[in-house]
Amino acid sequence: MTPLTPPAISLRSATKRFATRSGAPFTAITDVTLDVAAGEFVTIVGPTGCGKSTTLSLVSGLEPASAGTVEVHGRPVTAIPEGIGYMFQTDAVLPWKNVLDNVALGLRYHKVAKAEAHAKARDWIQRVGLGGFEDRYPHQLSGGMRKRVAMAQSLIGEPSILLLDEPFGALDVQTREHMQDELLELWSGTGAAVVFITHDLTEAISLADRVVVMTAGPGTVKDAVQIELPRPRKVEEIRLTPEFTEIYRNVWNSLREEVEITRARGAANVA
Amino acid sequence: MSHDLLVAGEVRPMDPETARTRRSLGRVRGKNRSAWVVYAVRALLVVAWLASWEIAARTIIDPFFYSKPSAIWDKLVVWFEDGTSHGSIWSNMAVTLEEAVLGFLIGTLAGVVLGVILGRSRFLADVLAPFIKGANAIPRIVLASLFVIWFGLGMSSKVATAFVLVFFAVFFNAFQGAREVDKVLVDNARILGASRWDLMRTIVLPSATSWILASMHVAFGFALIGAVVGEVVGADKGMGLLINQAQGNFDAAGIYAGMVVVTVLALVAEWLITRLENRLTAWRPPSGSQAAGI
């Protein structure tokens, strides 16, 4: 990485504190340092409440960092940077717009003419496999189909940085694996930097070039494991290989400690 | 804290779950006894009620005070065939309706605009909360007297009365609706490049729509009450004036007849609002709007 081409995402000692109701500051993440190169697929795993989502909100510019620096394409993040796509954990499609208008939403915000936006949206609806559903409203779709709408909505702007916050968490296993494959297919060749948050270690490893393990909250980067599995990948098949099992064991060893710390805290709170 | 002060007068939109339950209850009933039985029993109830009133008025109770259905009917026939003491019944209905509709439109517009602005601006809401709570606590119907002094016996004093009643009903719901916008939807729109105005137009207003529409059912009733009360206080035309005059003449049948006419107006308006609601909420699962009219 030469200074001339800065990483797509660069966090330096990023820290985020929130004011709680009682007034005492709550530290969500502390001292997070992480670079993501253009075209790299990074997944972040970590125990519940370790600040994974907070990390994404700093990169996206939705929240400012309390300390440290956050840069996107070498420029400090002060507002929402251009070229960001973000898929949220919960449904973010507009229930009062049909599939076509939902997918075209970002283009319409960017003042693209309606006809052109709709033409492009139709194309993306085909690409995520929802052809024929253009006029449906979200409540008429299944959970997996709504995720496809959200995916098309995020990708239609051809983002150079794609942030995904447990996007497939609420889906059943078959649908999830199918969506993972489709995501890889849509991403391949775009050159977009991807940060994908998940609880599911199998998902993290099968998708990523690099798995980042975060500590129990306040979260920081504990470990990063390079995943040397060949692409293109088929997620159902890759997880059966011995290499996969080996990587899984490594990452899990690193993650287990943190999960146990979090569990112990949870138990203490219950008691 | 003051944020929470503002939620006092809201009318909650029916959540889809409740609505669905109600509907399925309706469906079960419809399956067991076909719909016409329900209508027949309803008709029977009305007939029984009117007949017992009529008979009682002819035997034990004094029809001078309590009137009787046949007298009310006669009064209505006179009003519709020969006209009233203040011109034709239609022109009186038109005046009352015009006042109510104007008050309703202006009140709804003001309520929505101010409710949405305050719902999205914590600072403004904090500053204005005590004033709005205070204004809401005023027995606003009494303002009708003041408005007659200010604006005279014409239409504007009734529009003003309808306005103050409608405004608060709509305001509290628009405020609550604008506050309850899903944060993920707002964040998603911001990421997709929405400007402040885009956010208002495409996220906040549609989100608040079901809240606003829920309040509009109540609000039109209020608008009609405002117009009629305003006319009772002082007017040169309208249903309230007819009712007031009937009262002055100890004409109980006239008061009832006025009530019947106003009730019919309210029911027609309610039907129109339900149709509007169904159109504006076509994106929703087919339940919410159906039961709201009950």
Image (cartoon, grey):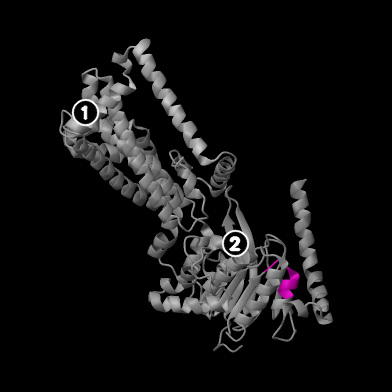
Please report, as a chain letter, where disc 1 is located: B
Q: Name the residue under label 2.
A: A90
Instruction: Using the rendered image of the protein, determine whether residue B217 is visible from the camera's viewpoint.
Output: yes
- Same chain for mark 1 and mark 2? The answer is no
Label 1 Cα neighbours within 10 Å, binned few <14 / some 14-19 / many ≥20: few
Residue B161 picture quarter: top left
Front in this rendered view, residue B129 or B281: B281
Task: Name the spot of residue B121 as percent of width and height, x first.
Answer: 41, 53
Amino acid type, label 2: Thr
A40 up-or-down from B6: above or below? below
Predominant secondary structure, magenta span: helix
Which residue does the image show at 58% across and 45% down from the upper left? B24
How far apart marks 1 and 2 lie (CA) works out to: 63 Å
Q: What element carries label 1?
A: helix
Q: Mark 1 points at which residue?
A: B78
- Depth check: give the residue in front, B140 or A222: B140
Quadrant in the rendering for residue B200: bottom left
Mark sitting on residue B291? none
Would residue A139 be found to the left or right of residue B138 on screen? right
x, y percent for residue B254: 26, 24
- Number of other residues with Cα within 10 Å of mark 2, as a class: few under 14, some 14 to 19, many 20 or more: some
Depth check: give the residue in front, B281 or B179. Answer: B281
Question: Is A40 above or below relative to B234?
Answer: below
Kindly report which numbered mark, 1 or 2, lies closer to the viewer in this rendering. 1
Residue found at x 34% / y 42%: B268
Q: From the image, which quarter does the C terminus of chain A lie in?
A: top right
Residue B66: % across, % down? 33, 17
Q: Which chain carries label 2?
A: A
- The kind of secondary structure element at disc 2 is loop
Region of the chain picked out in magenta, as a range: A198-205
Relative image position of residue A185 (x, y in whole percent): 63, 81
Q: At x 61% / y 88%, what residue is drawn? A: A1
